[in-house]
Protein backbone atom coordinates (compact mmCIF):
# COMPACT_ATOMS: atom_id res chain seq x y z
CA UNK A 1 0.00 0.00 0.00
CA UNK A 2 1.51 3.37 -0.97
CA UNK A 3 1.93 6.24 1.49
CA UNK A 4 -1.11 8.23 0.34
CA UNK A 5 -3.38 5.22 0.67
CA UNK A 6 -1.94 4.49 4.11
CA UNK A 7 -2.70 8.05 5.20
CA UNK A 8 -6.27 7.77 4.04
CA UNK A 9 -6.81 4.27 5.38
CA UNK A 10 -5.68 5.29 8.85
CA UNK A 11 -7.90 8.35 8.76
CA UNK A 12 -10.80 6.28 7.54
CA UNK A 13 -10.44 4.06 10.59
CA UNK A 14 -10.87 7.15 12.73
CA UNK A 15 -13.86 8.19 10.66
CA UNK A 16 -15.70 4.92 11.08
CA UNK A 17 -14.74 4.06 14.64
CA UNK A 18 -14.55 7.29 16.57
CA UNK A 19 -16.96 10.22 16.68
CA UNK A 20 -15.74 13.79 16.84
CA UNK A 21 -17.49 16.75 18.40
CA UNK A 22 -17.64 18.61 15.08
CA UNK A 23 -18.66 15.41 13.19
CA UNK A 24 -15.45 15.48 11.22
CA UNK A 25 -12.61 13.02 11.64
CA UNK A 26 -9.19 14.55 11.96
CA UNK A 27 -5.64 13.25 11.78
CA UNK A 28 -3.71 13.74 15.00
CA UNK A 29 -0.63 14.58 12.92
CA UNK A 30 -2.36 16.46 10.11
CA UNK A 31 0.36 19.13 10.03
CA UNK A 32 3.09 16.59 9.25
CA UNK A 33 4.70 17.48 5.92
CA UNK A 34 4.72 14.84 3.21
CA UNK A 35 6.51 16.77 0.46
CA UNK A 36 7.15 20.28 -0.84
CA UNK A 37 6.95 21.89 -4.25
CA UNK A 38 8.68 25.24 -4.32
CA UNK A 39 7.29 27.24 -1.41
CA UNK A 40 4.24 24.99 -1.07
CA UNK A 41 4.31 22.20 1.52
CA UNK A 42 1.75 19.40 1.33
CA UNK A 43 0.77 17.94 4.70
CA UNK A 44 -0.98 14.76 5.74
CA UNK A 45 -4.04 16.87 6.48
CA UNK A 46 -4.05 18.28 2.94
CA UNK A 47 -3.91 14.80 1.41
CA UNK A 48 -6.56 13.44 3.76
CA UNK A 49 -8.97 16.31 3.05
CA UNK A 50 -8.60 15.82 -0.70
CA UNK A 51 -8.99 12.06 -0.58
CA UNK A 52 -11.85 12.26 1.90
CA UNK A 53 -13.85 14.57 -0.35
CA UNK A 54 -13.11 12.72 -3.61
CA UNK A 55 -13.10 9.06 -2.61
CA UNK A 56 -14.07 8.86 1.05
CA UNK A 57 -17.56 7.50 0.42
CA UNK A 58 -16.50 4.84 -2.08
CA UNK A 59 -13.60 3.74 0.11
CA UNK A 60 -15.81 3.44 3.19
CA UNK A 61 -18.44 1.43 1.29
CA UNK A 62 -15.92 -0.82 -0.44
CA UNK A 63 -14.05 -1.59 2.75
CA UNK A 64 -17.29 -2.29 4.62
CA UNK A 65 -18.40 -4.59 1.81
CA UNK A 66 -15.16 -6.53 2.15
CA UNK A 67 -15.64 -6.97 5.89
CA UNK A 68 -19.22 -8.20 5.46
CA UNK A 69 -18.46 -10.48 2.52
CA UNK A 70 -15.52 -12.08 4.31
CA UNK A 71 -17.69 -12.76 7.34
CA UNK A 72 -20.64 -14.16 5.41
CA UNK A 73 -19.29 -15.86 2.28
CA UNK A 74 -16.81 -18.71 2.29
CA UNK A 75 -14.03 -18.58 -0.29
CA UNK A 76 -14.43 -21.57 -2.60
CA UNK A 77 -11.96 -23.22 -4.95
CA UNK A 78 -14.10 -21.95 -7.80
CA UNK A 79 -13.68 -18.37 -6.58
CA UNK A 80 -9.92 -18.80 -6.30
CA UNK A 81 -9.71 -20.21 -9.82
CA UNK A 82 -11.90 -17.43 -11.19
CA UNK A 83 -9.84 -14.73 -9.45
CA UNK A 84 -6.59 -16.24 -10.69
CA UNK A 85 -7.97 -16.40 -14.23
CA UNK A 86 -9.04 -12.76 -14.04
CA UNK A 87 -5.62 -11.72 -12.77
CA UNK A 88 -3.87 -13.54 -15.61
CA UNK A 89 -6.21 -12.00 -18.17
CA UNK A 90 -5.47 -8.51 -16.80
CA UNK A 91 -1.74 -9.15 -17.02
CA UNK A 92 -2.05 -10.50 -20.56
CA UNK A 93 -4.36 -7.77 -21.85
CA UNK A 94 -2.86 -4.73 -20.12
CA UNK A 95 0.75 -5.91 -19.88
CA UNK A 96 3.15 -3.35 -18.42
CA UNK A 97 0.30 -0.92 -17.75
CA UNK A 98 -1.21 -3.30 -15.24
CA UNK A 99 2.17 -4.04 -13.68
CA UNK A 100 2.78 -0.31 -13.26
CA UNK A 101 -0.66 0.11 -11.72
CA UNK A 102 0.07 -2.53 -9.09
CA UNK A 103 3.44 -0.96 -8.34
CA UNK A 104 1.86 2.47 -7.89
CA UNK A 105 -0.70 0.95 -5.52
CA UNK A 106 2.06 -0.84 -3.64
CA UNK A 107 0.45 -4.22 -4.28
CA UNK A 108 1.83 -7.62 -5.25
CA UNK A 109 -0.10 -10.01 -7.48
CA UNK A 110 -1.07 -12.03 -4.42
CA UNK A 111 -2.29 -9.00 -2.51
CA UNK A 112 -4.37 -7.82 -5.46
CA UNK A 113 -5.85 -11.30 -5.74
CA UNK A 114 -6.70 -11.62 -2.05
CA UNK A 115 -7.61 -8.01 -1.27
CA UNK A 116 -9.60 -7.11 -4.38
CA UNK A 117 -10.51 -9.91 -6.77
CA UNK A 118 -11.62 -12.56 -4.28
CA UNK A 119 -13.53 -10.13 -2.01
CA UNK A 120 -15.35 -8.89 -5.12
CA UNK A 121 -16.47 -12.43 -5.92
CA UNK A 122 -17.54 -12.94 -2.31
CA UNK A 123 -19.58 -9.72 -2.39
CA UNK A 124 -21.43 -10.95 -5.48
CA UNK A 125 -22.85 -13.80 -3.40
CA UNK A 126 -24.34 -11.58 -0.71
CA UNK A 127 -27.61 -10.97 -2.57
CA UNK A 128 -28.23 -14.69 -3.06
CA UNK A 129 -27.51 -15.35 0.61
CA UNK A 130 -29.87 -12.52 1.57
CA UNK A 131 -32.60 -14.19 -0.48
CA UNK A 132 -31.87 -17.56 1.12
CA UNK A 133 -32.11 -16.09 4.63
CA UNK A 134 -35.33 -14.24 3.80
CA UNK A 135 -36.76 -16.73 1.33
CA UNK A 136 -40.45 -16.69 2.30
CA UNK A 137 -40.60 -12.91 2.29
CA UNK A 138 -38.80 -12.49 -1.04
CA UNK A 139 -40.71 -15.15 -2.97
CA UNK A 140 -44.03 -13.76 -1.74
CA UNK A 141 -43.03 -10.44 -3.27
CA UNK A 142 -41.54 -11.64 -6.57
CA UNK A 143 -43.41 -14.94 -7.07
CA UNK A 144 -40.78 -16.94 -9.00
CA UNK A 145 -42.05 -19.61 -11.38
CA UNK A 146 -40.02 -22.08 -13.38
CA UNK A 147 -41.40 -22.42 -16.89
CA UNK A 148 -40.55 -23.09 -20.52
CA UNK A 149 -41.64 -20.47 -23.06
CA UNK A 150 -41.37 -20.82 -26.84
CA UNK A 151 -42.12 -17.75 -28.96
CA UNK A 152 -43.34 -17.94 -32.57
CA UNK A 153 -44.13 -15.25 -35.12
CA UNK A 154 -47.08 -17.08 -36.69
CA UNK A 155 -50.05 -18.86 -35.20
CA UNK A 156 -49.58 -21.82 -37.54
CA UNK A 157 -46.02 -22.43 -36.31
CA UNK A 158 -47.16 -22.11 -32.70
CA UNK A 159 -50.02 -24.56 -33.15
CA UNK A 160 -47.82 -27.09 -34.93
CA UNK A 161 -45.25 -26.94 -32.14
CA UNK A 162 -48.00 -27.21 -29.54
CA UNK A 163 -49.32 -30.37 -31.20
CA UNK A 164 -45.84 -31.92 -31.29
CA UNK A 165 -45.23 -31.12 -27.64
CA UNK A 166 -48.59 -32.48 -26.53
CA UNK A 167 -48.18 -35.78 -28.34
CA UNK A 168 -44.58 -36.08 -27.12
CA UNK A 169 -43.07 -36.47 -30.58
CA UNK A 170 -40.63 -33.61 -29.97
CA UNK A 171 -38.98 -31.95 -27.00
CA UNK A 172 -39.17 -28.20 -26.47
CA UNK A 173 -35.86 -27.34 -28.13
CA UNK A 174 -36.61 -29.41 -31.23
CA UNK A 175 -40.20 -28.19 -31.54
CA UNK A 176 -38.95 -24.60 -31.41
CA UNK A 177 -36.17 -25.11 -33.94
CA UNK A 178 -38.35 -27.07 -36.39
CA UNK A 179 -41.06 -24.41 -36.33
CA UNK A 180 -39.03 -21.26 -36.95
CA UNK A 181 -38.57 -20.17 -33.34
CA UNK A 182 -35.29 -18.93 -31.88
CA UNK A 183 -36.32 -19.97 -28.35
CA UNK A 184 -33.93 -22.40 -26.70
CA UNK A 185 -36.52 -24.55 -24.98
CA UNK A 186 -34.71 -24.17 -21.67
CA UNK A 187 -36.68 -24.13 -18.44
CA UNK A 188 -36.24 -20.65 -16.96
CA UNK A 189 -37.20 -18.87 -13.76
CA UNK A 190 -39.57 -15.94 -14.26
CA UNK A 191 -40.68 -13.37 -11.69
CA UNK A 192 -43.05 -10.43 -11.62
CA UNK A 193 -39.97 -8.36 -12.52
CA UNK A 194 -39.32 -10.26 -15.77
CA UNK A 195 -39.62 -7.60 -18.46
CA UNK A 196 -39.40 -9.94 -21.44
CA UNK A 197 -42.87 -11.43 -20.93
CA UNK A 198 -46.00 -10.07 -22.60
CA UNK A 199 -48.74 -9.01 -20.17
CA UNK A 200 -51.24 -11.60 -21.44
CA UNK A 201 -48.61 -14.32 -21.30
CA UNK A 202 -47.71 -13.29 -17.76
CA UNK A 203 -51.33 -13.57 -16.64
CA UNK A 204 -51.60 -17.10 -17.99
CA UNK A 205 -48.20 -18.05 -16.59
CA UNK A 206 -49.09 -16.88 -13.09
CA UNK A 207 -52.34 -18.87 -13.04
CA UNK A 208 -51.12 -22.07 -14.74
CA UNK A 209 -50.01 -25.23 -12.96
CA UNK A 210 -47.53 -27.92 -13.98
CA UNK A 211 -50.35 -30.43 -14.48
CA UNK A 212 -51.94 -28.14 -17.09
CA UNK A 213 -49.21 -29.07 -19.57
CA UNK A 214 -48.54 -27.09 -22.74
CA UNK A 215 -50.78 -24.26 -23.89
CA UNK A 216 -50.63 -21.56 -26.55
CA UNK A 217 -51.14 -17.88 -25.72
CA UNK A 218 -51.36 -15.06 -28.31
CA UNK A 219 -49.44 -11.94 -27.23
CA UNK A 220 -51.58 -8.95 -26.29
CA UNK A 221 -50.65 -7.13 -29.51
CA UNK A 222 -50.95 -10.27 -31.67
CA UNK A 223 -47.38 -9.82 -32.86
CA UNK A 224 -46.30 -13.21 -31.54
CA UNK A 225 -47.59 -16.46 -30.12
CA UNK A 226 -46.19 -18.15 -27.05
CA UNK A 227 -46.36 -21.85 -26.30
CA UNK A 228 -45.70 -22.34 -22.61
CA UNK A 229 -45.64 -24.86 -19.80
CA UNK A 230 -45.17 -24.27 -16.09
CA UNK A 231 -42.48 -26.71 -14.96
CA UNK A 232 -42.64 -25.90 -11.25
CA UNK A 233 -44.50 -23.25 -9.28
CA UNK A 234 -43.12 -24.22 -5.86
CA UNK A 235 -39.90 -22.21 -5.30
CA UNK A 236 -38.84 -24.56 -2.50
CA UNK A 237 -38.18 -27.16 -5.20
CA UNK A 238 -35.66 -24.93 -6.98
CA UNK A 239 -34.52 -22.85 -4.04
CA UNK A 240 -30.86 -22.41 -5.04
CA UNK A 241 -31.74 -21.37 -8.58
CA UNK A 242 -34.44 -19.04 -7.31
CA UNK A 243 -32.01 -17.41 -4.87
CA UNK A 244 -29.52 -16.77 -7.66
CA UNK A 245 -32.16 -15.37 -10.02
CA UNK A 246 -33.84 -13.21 -7.40
CA UNK A 247 -30.44 -12.03 -6.16
CA UNK A 248 -29.78 -10.49 -9.57
CA UNK A 249 -32.83 -8.20 -9.37
CA UNK A 250 -31.96 -4.57 -8.70
CA UNK A 251 -34.56 -4.09 -5.98
CA UNK A 252 -33.46 -7.26 -4.22
CA UNK A 253 -29.82 -6.19 -4.41
CA UNK A 254 -30.75 -2.86 -2.83
CA UNK A 255 -32.68 -4.61 -0.06
CA UNK A 256 -29.75 -6.99 0.40
CA UNK A 257 -27.34 -4.10 0.82
CA UNK A 258 -29.48 -2.51 3.49
CA UNK A 259 -29.95 -5.86 5.23
CA UNK A 260 -26.23 -6.65 5.51
CA UNK A 261 -25.10 -3.14 6.43
CA UNK A 262 -27.80 -3.04 9.10
CA UNK A 263 -26.78 -6.45 10.44
CA UNK A 264 -23.16 -5.34 10.84
CA UNK A 265 -24.00 -1.96 12.35
CA UNK A 266 -22.40 0.23 9.68
CA UNK A 267 -22.13 3.75 11.11
CA UNK A 268 -20.49 6.91 9.76
CA UNK A 269 -19.35 9.72 12.02
CA UNK A 270 -17.57 11.97 9.55
CA UNK A 271 -20.01 14.48 8.01
CA UNK A 272 -18.20 14.73 4.68
CA UNK A 273 -18.38 10.98 4.16
CA UNK A 274 -21.91 10.80 5.57
CA UNK A 275 -23.21 13.36 3.07
CA UNK A 276 -21.43 11.66 0.16
CA UNK A 277 -22.77 8.21 1.10
CA UNK A 278 -26.28 9.64 1.52
CA UNK A 279 -26.08 11.04 -2.00
CA UNK A 280 -24.37 8.15 -3.79
CA UNK A 281 -25.07 5.04 -1.67
CA UNK A 282 -28.45 5.58 0.03
CA UNK A 283 -29.11 1.85 0.52
CA UNK A 284 -25.91 1.56 2.57
CA UNK A 285 -26.80 4.38 4.95
CA UNK A 286 -28.57 2.41 7.66
CA UNK A 287 -27.65 4.15 10.89
CA UNK A 288 -30.86 6.20 11.06
CA UNK A 289 -33.20 3.28 10.30
CA UNK A 290 -35.49 1.98 13.07
CA UNK A 291 -34.05 -1.04 14.85
CA UNK A 292 -36.48 -3.49 13.23
CA UNK A 293 -36.47 -1.93 9.74
CA UNK A 294 -34.59 -4.80 8.15
CA UNK A 295 -35.53 -7.58 10.50
Image (cartoon, helix red, strand yellow):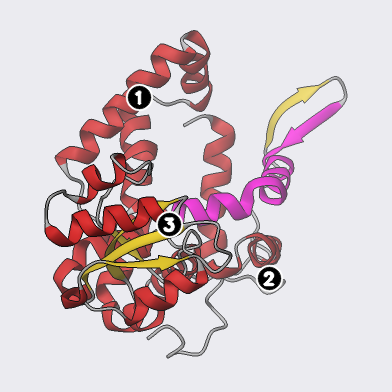
x then y, percent, for residue 211: 16, 77
Question: Going by the image, does 232 lie left or right of 196?
Answer: left
170, 192: nearer the viewer = 170
Q: Residue at x 37, y 86 (%)?
A: 295
Drawn side of residue 291 relative to residue 49, left or right = left
Does any portion of residue 127 appear in the rendered image?
no
Binning the other alpha carbons within 10 Å of mark 1 as few (below 14), some (14 to 19) or many (20 upward) gives some
Q: Residue at x 38, y 31 (%)?
A: 112
Q: Look at the image and give the residue range highlighted in magenta.
A: 40-64
Q: Identify which residue, 14 or 101, lies in the foreground.
A: 101
Q: From what the image shows, is residue 37 above or below residue 234?
A: above
Element on which disc 2 rests: loop
52, 137: nearer the viewer: 137
Q: Are marks 1 and 3 in contact (CB under 8 Å)?
A: no
User: Going 64% across and 47% down the picture, which residue do you hit?
Assistant: 55
Nearest to viewer (mark 2 / mark 1): 1
Query: Helix, strand or loop at disc 1?
Result: helix
Q: Nearer the viewer, mark 1 or mark 3?
A: 3
Q: Residue 61 lies in magenta, yes or no?
A: yes
Mark 2 and mark 1: span between their CA atoms?
A: 40 Å
Task: Tell whether position 136 is magenta.
Answer: no
Name the residue beneath numbered marker 2.
23
Q: Position of residue 272 (x, y in %)?
A: 71, 61
Residue that badge 3 annotates: 155
User: Residue 87: which numbered mark, if any?
Assistant: 1
Amino acid sequence: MNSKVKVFASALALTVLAGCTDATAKLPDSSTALFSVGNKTITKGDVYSLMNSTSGASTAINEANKVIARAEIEVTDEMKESAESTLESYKTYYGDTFTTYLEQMGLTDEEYLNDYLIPSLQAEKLSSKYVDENFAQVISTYMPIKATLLTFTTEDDANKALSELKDGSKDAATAAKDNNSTSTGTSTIYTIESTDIDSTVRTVLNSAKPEDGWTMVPASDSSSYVVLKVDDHNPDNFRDEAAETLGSLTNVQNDSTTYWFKKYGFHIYDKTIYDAVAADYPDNLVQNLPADETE
